[in-house]
Amino acid sequence: MEDATTLDFAFQPHASPVPADVRAGLLANPGFGKTITDHMVVINYAEGRGWHDARVVPYGPLSISPACAVLHYAQEIFEGLKAYRLPDGGAALFRPEANARRFNESADRMAMPRIPEALFLAALHQMVRADGAWIPEIEGGSLYLRPFMFASENFLGVKPASEFLFIVIASPAGSYFKDADSVTLWVSEHYTRAAPGGTGAAKCGGNYASSLIAQAEAIREGCHQVVFLDAAERKWVEELGGMNVMFAFDDGSIQTPPLGGTILPGITRDSLLTLARDAGFTVREEPYSIDQWQADAASGRLREAFACGTAAVVTPIGKVRGRGFEFSIGNQGPGLVAQKFKDQLVAIQRGRAPDPHGWLHRLS
Ligand SMILES: *Cc1c(COP(=O)(O)O)cnc(C)c1O
């Protein structure tokens, strides 16, 4: 096998990239996930050969066979992280080693090959080197990186594939926070996101496919996001479709559901828990029931609830609704704890505050 940690990347520049003035227009108001940059990283994997043919090529369509395994059995995983512009003009990623580690844990669960961490990180570097001009300079702007891997073998038999493609694409992102200062959640009654022994802890497309109907139901019920309860007892709060959830209490404690295989181990979640411990909060990673949530919101013991993830950073939760009930939390707006953590995290990510845990990964 080739030593994949030392692959050289071939570079094929885009013959007609988006003109600078058009790009500037797009970067003034990028939204989220609408625009894809000029290039992409592609690396092949084949059983017996390992990772090979690392390259940066013009962004464009892939040609795959209708028999491509991913189209049938959904062997696919992904990651999401952001590149930030630093005050000195450089660029940085936030805890990309954690994304590399989680990517490989997802790969294990989905019977896919691991990618050496160094190769995963090199791919991110190549992506930002090629398209760093796409990092928006607006407040709250970043370049969202989307590494993913899928089964590319053409074979209809049911087995782990023997060929895969690893790809990184990038999309400029604005601030998620612009208008909604808090969200209303819909508690899914019929649908669950993950069961014990299932794929809830893996960042795989299939988890999203199965959550979309519940998210659509939430929208139909006039809510922003769905929140899932556990599959076994339909009692314990797990997470949103793509964000973890946290609770802040009047005694200065913070609580979040524990990582038990059915929720996604968010890097934002882990970072906020670390910041909370640093700041002297009591932190509990313990189950929290929907009934307790309602009771604590009513008594005022619960001061704030918020969702957290890379895309939206920290999103305050103002109201919770389900079949036959509704309750609000605190003043329904952004609470002090959520705001403080968000400010602190964003300051570290953007190189505006000391980084005591070495989370910032500067790109050369
Ligand atoms: C990605 C993701 C999160 C958040 O993880 P971060 O590393 O904080 O971005 C939470 N829940 C689900 C289901 C996810 O896919």
Image (cartoon, rainbow, N blue to C red):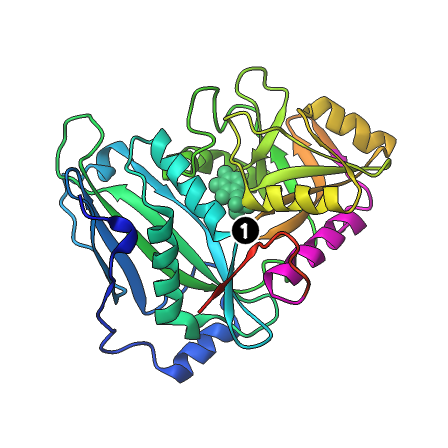
Does the numbered disc 1 mark a residue whose Cβ is under 8 Å from ligand 1? yes
- Compared to 50, does 294 lie above or below? above
Residue placed at 25% from the left, 32% from the top?
73
Percent of width and height locating residue 267: 55, 44
**Quadrant hosting residue 266:** top right
Query: How many marks are shown on the rendered structure?
Result: 1
Other-residue count near label 1 (Cα within 10 Å), few / some / many at <14 / 14–19 / ≥20: some
Locate the N terminus and report the quarter of the image it occupies. Answer: top left
Chain part drawn in magenta: 327-352
Residue placed at 61% from the left, 70% from the top?
139
Residue placed at 74% from the left, 28% from the top?
293
- Compared to 63, does 68 lie above or below? above
Q: In the structure shown, which secondary structural element does the residue marked by tag 1 occupy?
A: loop
Magenta run includes residue 334: yes
**Quadrant hosting residue 322:** top right
Identify which residue, 82 or 25, lies in the foreground.
82
Identify which residue, 214 or 282, lies in the foreground.
282
Q: Which residue is mark 1?
A: 310
